[in-house]
């Protein structure tokens, strides 16, 4: 699950990009297969194939120590996956046993050779200049490379993220060989990395009678200096892999051919059945999601796009993923645009990437693209710009003539979205540009109701000053005052009452704001409403007064003080 706002939006693009790359059939042996996704208003949910055996960390804790050849099989498979990622220009950045999912194991029924897959691309990163990235620290603490904490080990402000992956793989290999970690806390790892005279903590490896080749492998992955660690291709050729795992590929899967031993395990031969299982699982997921979630989220789950395995023109996609605006402009001006992109799900995916990048949206404006087309989560460029709080882009789109009332999948207009977020500047601009201040979403909430529900006092006052109807109701007959009273937003309640909101308006359930506040136990709001003259003897459809509702709900503070 990924939030679709602020930093979450960037992670949304990053994870979808990695899914796009590594859900291709040629990577099926190495990565957990994604079956599809669906969205709620603020989150992206991604589903992947089901692994009944769970993750490697839980398995290791529950079972006897693994044999060394088993550890080598596991490490080799993960290494092959990392090699594929690195070769494609990605780093995982969160390698740990928790993210290694078990497809088959000796404990399976029937027993089988180890087959594990790497999962969770949420931390993954496209590698930029050379092999480095920004200073952002991701991953799990005790699996994180020391250069993420020691500036003297990094290249200025940049990190070699493939080398970070290699360190984490070394820690993971140490863990499955010994059921312990090389460093018990962060300070120990930093001390080791800071002191060239400090020896590597190999005691646990020795105690577990781990072979010299295995010790050498772990050491080579966990060298202090990132530049001195084995890279993924060199690690695949390490003697430990060659002696214990003859079926491990010596090069990552790139063009469909690679050197491998004539001896092949179930891991090598297992992809023939996995694709069928994935298709069945995908159908089951799609059916269950349609039934279980559509009513609640009004979001249709997205199956993996057909074009991921088709031969389509991906030049525009590659330009968007690479932030190559110059190439994107050339393609758009030469007629390769989002309207002619096929199949349709490819065009929808392209729009997601374009609509989240200000420069690409501006490019769409400049090249006369259709600015009302919706992406795969049913957003227009204006919806995306408002959600991101990008005022300058919103102004540009409005000047270009976009529909200011375009609604998202939940019926929210841009003004509703800005009001819900409490973005007063955005609200003011949208209203001044002609946005309908009384537009309702699918549940009947107006922008004022949205702002009141979320406790945005300034936005509430602004909307009222610009003409919002204080008494507008949603489908349940709830006004902005009712919603604020129910949510415990005392400052909003006061502002609405001061502006003249009717404190006796009843919802369809027969409750006044006072009845609802008493039921929820919001003592301050109860006192405020009573002081403003709310009828303390008003009864709902069940003939209950505010005092009775408070007592029935167990709100003893209100009952004992009896503000009524």
Image (cartoon, helix red, strand yellow):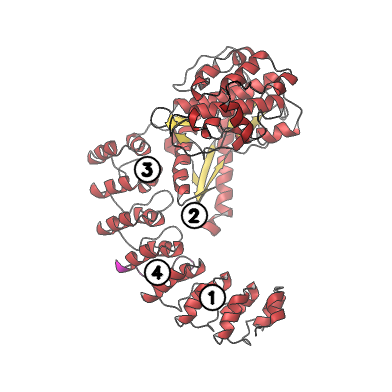
Mark 4, residues whose alpha carbon is within 10 Å: few (<14), some, or many (≥20)? some
Q: Does residue 16 belong to the magenta stretch? A: no
What percent of the width, then of the height, locates residue 350?
37, 43
> Which of the 4 image quadrants contains residue 111?
top right
Which marked residue is nearer to the observer: mark 1 or mark 4? 1
The mark that comes first in sequence, 3 or 2, is 2
Q: Which residue is mark 3?
A: 350
Closer-to-camera residue (128/405): 128
For the stretch drawn in magenta, the main secondary structure is loop
Alpha carbons under labels 1 and 2: distance apart: 24 Å
> Which of the 4 image quadrants contains residue 556?
bottom right
Q: Which residue is mark 1?
A: 482
Alpha carbons under labels 4 and 3: distance apart: 29 Å
Alpha carbons under labels 1 and 4: distance apart: 19 Å
Which marked residue is nearer to the observer: mark 3 or mark 2? 2
Tell me: 24 left or right of 537: left
> Which of the 4 image quadrants contains residue 525?
bottom right
Segment tinted magenta in the rendering? 432-443
The mark that comes first in sequence, 4 or 2, is 2
What percent of the width, then of the height, locates residue 281?
59, 40
Q: Which residue is mark 2?
A: 42
Q: Secondary structure at mark 3?
A: helix
Marks 2 and 1: in contact by CB < 8 Å? no
Q: Secondary structure at mark 4?
A: loop
Q: Is residue 26 visible?
A: no
Alpha carbons under labels 4 and 2: distance apart: 20 Å
Q: Which residue is mark 4?
A: 439
For the point 60% across and 33% down, which residue is it?
143
Q: Does residue 434 belong to the magenta stretch? A: yes
């Amino acid at each position: 699950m990924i939030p679709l706002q602020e930093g979450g939006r960037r992670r949304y693009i990053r994870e979808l990009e990695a899914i796009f790359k590594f859900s291709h059939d040629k990577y099926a042996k190495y990565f957990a297969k994604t079956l599809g996704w669906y969205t709620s208003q603020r989150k992206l949910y991604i589903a992947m194939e089901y692994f009944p055996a769970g993750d490697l960390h839980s398995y290791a804790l529950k079972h006897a120590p693994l044999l060394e050849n088993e550890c080598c099989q596991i490490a080799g498979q993960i290494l092959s996956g990392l090699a594929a990622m690195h070769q494609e220009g990605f780093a995982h950045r969160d390698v740990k046993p928790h993210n290694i999912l078990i497809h088959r194991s000796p404990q399976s029924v029937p027993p089988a050779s180890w087959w594990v897959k790497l999962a969770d691309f949420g931390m993954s990163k496209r590698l930029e200049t050379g092999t480095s990235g920004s200073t952002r620290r991701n991953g799990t603490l005790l699996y994180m490379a020391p250069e993420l904490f020691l500036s003297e080990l990094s290249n200025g402000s940049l990190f070699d993220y493939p080398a970070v992956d290699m360190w984490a793989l070394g820690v993971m290999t140490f863990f499955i060989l010994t059921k312990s970690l090389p460093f018990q806390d962060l300070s120990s790892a930093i001390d080791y990395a800071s002191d060239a005279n400090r020896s590597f903590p190999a005691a646990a490896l020795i105690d577990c009678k781990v072979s010299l080749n295995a010790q050498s492998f772990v050491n080579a992955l966990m060298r202090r200096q990132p530049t001195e660690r084995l890279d993924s291709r060199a690690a695949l050729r390490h003697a430990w892999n060659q002696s214990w795992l003859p079926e491990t590929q010596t090069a990552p899967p790139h063009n469909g051919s690679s050197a491998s031993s004539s001896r092949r395990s179930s891991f090598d031969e297992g992809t023939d059945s996995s694709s069928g299982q994935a298709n069945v699982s995908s159908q089951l997921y799609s059916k269950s999601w349609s039934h279980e979630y559509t009513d609640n989220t009004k979001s249709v789950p997205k199956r993996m796009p057909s074009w991921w395995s088709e031969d389509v023109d991906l030049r525009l996609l590659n330009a968007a993923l690479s932030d190559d605006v110059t190439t994107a402009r050339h393609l758009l001006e030469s007629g390769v645009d989002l309207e002619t992109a096929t199949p349709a799900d490819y065009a929808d995916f392209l729009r997601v990437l374009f609509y989240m990048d200000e420069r690409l949206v501006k490019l769409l404006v400049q090249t006369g693209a259709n600015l009302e087309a919706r992406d795969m989560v049913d957003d227009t460029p204006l919806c995306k710009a408002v959600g991101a709080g990008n005022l300058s882009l919103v102004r540009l789109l409005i000047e270009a003539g976009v529909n200011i009332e375009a609604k998202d999948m939940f019926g929210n207009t841009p003004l509703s979205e800005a009001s819900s977020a409490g973005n007063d500047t955005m609200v003011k601009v949208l209203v001044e540009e002609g946005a309908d201040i009384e537009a309702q979403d699918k549940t009947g909430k107006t922008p004022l109701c949205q702002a009141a529900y979320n406790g945005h006092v300034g936005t509430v006052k602004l909307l009222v000053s610009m003409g919002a109807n204080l008494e507008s109701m949603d489908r349940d007959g709830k006004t902005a005052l009712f919603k604020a009273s129910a949510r415990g937003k005392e400052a909003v309640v006061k502002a609405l009452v001061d502006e003249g909101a009717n404190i006796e308006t009843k919802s369809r359930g027969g409750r006044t704001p006072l009845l609802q506040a008493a039921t929820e136990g919001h003592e301050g709001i109860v006192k405020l409403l009573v002081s403003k003259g709310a009828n303390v003897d008003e009864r709902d459809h069940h003939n209950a007064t505010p005092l009775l509702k408070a007592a029935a709900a167990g709100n003893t503070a209100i009952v004992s003080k009896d503000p009524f």
